[in-house]
Every structure is written in structure tokens, then in C-alpha cells.
Image (tube, rainbow, N blue to C red):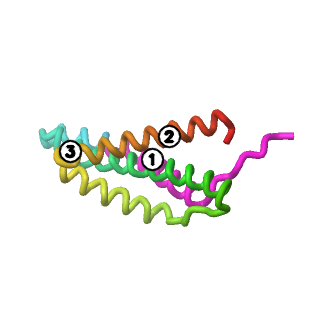
Amino acid sequence: MGVNRPKEHDAVREARDALVIVAAAAPVAAAVAVVAAVGAGDVEGWLRWLVGPLVVAGLLLGTLGSALLLADRVGRRFLRARPYTIGRFRLLAIAVGVAILLVAGLPTTWPVVIGFGIVCALLGGVILLGAALDM
């Protein structure tokens, strides 16, 4: 007799897969940025435009994935409802597009980026607490 854990809904799975794609692309983009920066002599510019959007997109997708997982668990338990599914490539396009806009607005957009980081960390903590309490 094993523990019957709730399965992820498609919306959660799509957000997680989009985050994995961004996380996998980040080291490749960083390597390309370093090589291009050495050749061009502009390290900050290359890192900002190649790695910055991926880091911000990762924060956006991490926040979205955690929020969807929390909504899925609470919705299923109390409302018998599930989050609406959006495809991972559409999520990637939206996240990278918004991330490019946020990076383009730096340093003015630092509060937004930091806010996404804090919200992502808080939601991740709630998810970990729920997993530790087997909810």
C-alpha cells in the first residue's frame, strides 16, 4: 500500500516544462555571451541581453509554476476546479517577451524583478511546506 499522491494537472506540467527549457538554455546563453563578450569587449552588454532575459523569464515561470501548483492543490481540494492549461511554447514566448521588456527597462524595473524573486521564493516555500506536511 503506497501513498496516493495527487498528480500534477496539465497547466502545472506545462509551466514546469517551460521553466526547464529556460533553465537548460541559460548555461548555453551564458557561454555564448562570454565568447561574444570576449570578442566584442562588452561583457556587461552581452550578459545583460543574453542571460538577463533568461534569468527574469525563469523568475516569471517559477512564480507562475508555483502559483499554478498551489491553485491546483487548493482548487482540487476545496472547489473541485483546475487551472486552465496554456501550452509551454506560448508560456515561453510570453515569459521571454516580458523578460526582455523588464531587462530593457533596467534599472527602473529592478523593483518588479526583485518582487518576482521574492514572490517566487515565498510560493516555493509554501509548496515545500505543503509537501513536508503531505498536503
Q: Answer whether labels 2 and 1 touch (C-beta < 8 Å).
A: yes
Judged from the image, the secondary structure of the residue bearing numbered disc 3 is helix
Q: Nearer the viewer, mark 2 or mark 3?
A: 2
Q: Whole-percent x and y of residue 37?
A: 19, 40
| Residue type highlighted by circle 1 | Gly
**First in sequence: mark 1 vs mark 3:** 3
Can you identify the residue that label 3 sits on? 46
**First in sequence: mark 2 vs mark 3:** 3
Are there few (<14), some (14-19), or many (20+) residues within 10 Å of tag 3?
many
Say which residue appears at 17% left-offset and 44% top-offset: 107
Compute the Cα span from label 1 to label 3.
24 Å
Compute the Cα span from label 2 to label 3.
30 Å
Q: Whole-percent x and y of residue 82?
A: 61, 62
Examine the structure image and report whether residue 4 is included in the region drawn in magenta.
Answer: yes
Q: Whole-percent x and y of residue 105?
A: 18, 52
Magenta span: helix, strand or loop, mainly?
helix
Are there few (<14), some (14-19), or many (20+) residues within 10 Å of tag 1?
many
Q: Which residues are magenta?
A: 1-29
Are there few (<14), some (14-19), or many (20+) residues within 10 Å of tag 2?
some
Q: Is residue 99 above or below residue 129?
A: below
Can you identify the residue that label 1 sits on? 62
**First in sequence: mark 2 vs mark 1:** 1
Judged from the image, the secondary structure of the residue bearing numbered disc 2 is helix
Say which residue appears at 68% left-offset and 38% top-offset: 134
| Residue type highlighted by circle 2 | Gly
Compute the Cα span from label 2 to label 1.
8 Å
- 133 to the left or right of 39: right
